[in-house]
Image: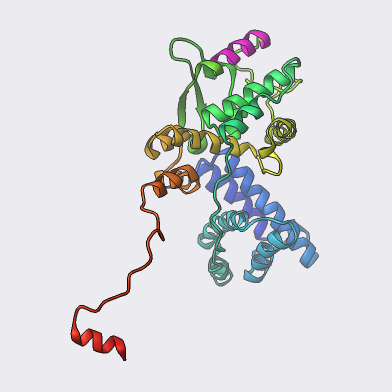
Amino acid sequence: MSDLAPLLQRFFTDKLDGQMNASVHTKAAYADTFRLLLTYAHQRTGTAPSALRLADLDADMIGGFLQHLEDKRGNSASTRNARRAALRSFFTYASYRAPGAIATISQVLAIPAKRTKTTIVSFLTRTEAEALIAAPDTTTWTGRRDRLLLHLGIQTGLRVSELIGLRVVDVEIGPHSQLRCLGKGRKHRVIPLQKPAVRLLNAWLAESGTTPTAPLFPTSRGTPLSRAAVAKLLARHVTVASGRCPSLRGKNVTPHTLRHTCAMMLLHAGIDTASIALWLGHATIQTTQAYLHADLELKRRSLDRLAPIGDHPPARYQASDALIAFLTDR
């Protein structure tokens, strides 16, 4: 076996598990990055992944792999940078355990991140959100489940991983109805619920009659919905909702769009960005600033406060000093 295989295994067991106590999502993302890299290196060199050496993963190989992600797999620059971050973590770890390969490692660590474009977040208007929530066929079991999922996604702003991770025990119905979730960065959050959401939850819990540890949004087999399943059902309901709300046609609606919609509704209600960051579980308030840039209504209100430009013809400039007038005429 080469020097790479045991080093990579120790990276996962020693650093990610032992030192960082990384989440399952982080470990899955890192493992996926190295599966793609080793497959790419195998295709390029003809060497089996278990036989690859650390020296084989030089700056040319890593740079070619990152470009391959964009050119062949169609990944965005942001995804490329996320893969690069995973590789940097490994090569930083390797620099202390393989000093003989420090020259190769240094060259890899010197590969810069690619600049990305900052796009305006996409969200649904209130009319579009209501049309989407009304799209599922509530005469079926899956339709009632999907309507509750869409409603909670928009009202609570939970990430799709947080939504599908909800269990029945995480729902608290009472004078102050709320949801509890374990979110990104292992942060526990409690989200209050509005009355329409409580009514849907009461009906769903009475119908499902499941145990406290059961998933709140199960499949027909009783297992939790996957992220891909949520994206698929959302696309189906967006198509139906487009018939009632034409503005949805051609709009790219993803599960994360529901989260953006919640944030924009809070912003339009006059909630400050610090409170919105707390509601959404953002690590910093800077993340929430993106919604200010996307809020066209806020920009229109700001414009209304300004005096119109061009109502009066511009006055001819008159110099206030004889010397300035002389210089102006030159």
Position of 20 compared to 220: left or right? left
Indicate the position of residue 158 as horizontal and vertical percent values. Answer: 54, 32
Residue lying furthest bottom in this view?
330
Q: Viewer-proximal residue, 295 or 91?
A: 295
Q: What is the basis of the colouring in this image?
A: rainbow
Residue 80 location, x and y as percent?
A: 62, 57
Q: Is residue 288 magenta?
A: no
Viewer-proximal residue among 124 and 4: 124
Answer left or right for 84 relative to 310: right
User: From what the image shows, is residue 269 above or below residue 17?
Assistant: above
Query: Quarter-wise, where is residue 233 in the image?
Result: top right
User: Is 218 above or below relative to 128?
Assistant: above
Observer able to see residue 295: no
When asked about the image quadrant of residue 88, the answer is: bottom right
Q: Is residue 203 magenta?
A: yes
Compared across the picture, whether 112 is left or right of 328 comes to: right
Q: Where's residue 94, x and y in %?
A: 55, 59
**243 lies above or below 44:** above
Quarter of the image containing the N terminus? bottom right
Q: Which residues are magenta?
A: 198-208
Picture residue at 67% right of the left edge, 43% below the top: 251
On the question of residue 75 being in view, the answer is: yes
At which x and y percent is residue 128?
62, 33
Residue sitting at x 58%, y 67%: 108
Identify whether 2 is placed above or below 265: below
Q: Is residue 89 left or right of residue 220?
A: left
What secondary structure characterizes most of the magenta part?
helix
Instruction: Tell me the quadrant of the picture where the C terminus can be found.
Output: bottom left
- Along the line of sight, which residue is nearer the eye, 235 or 325? 325
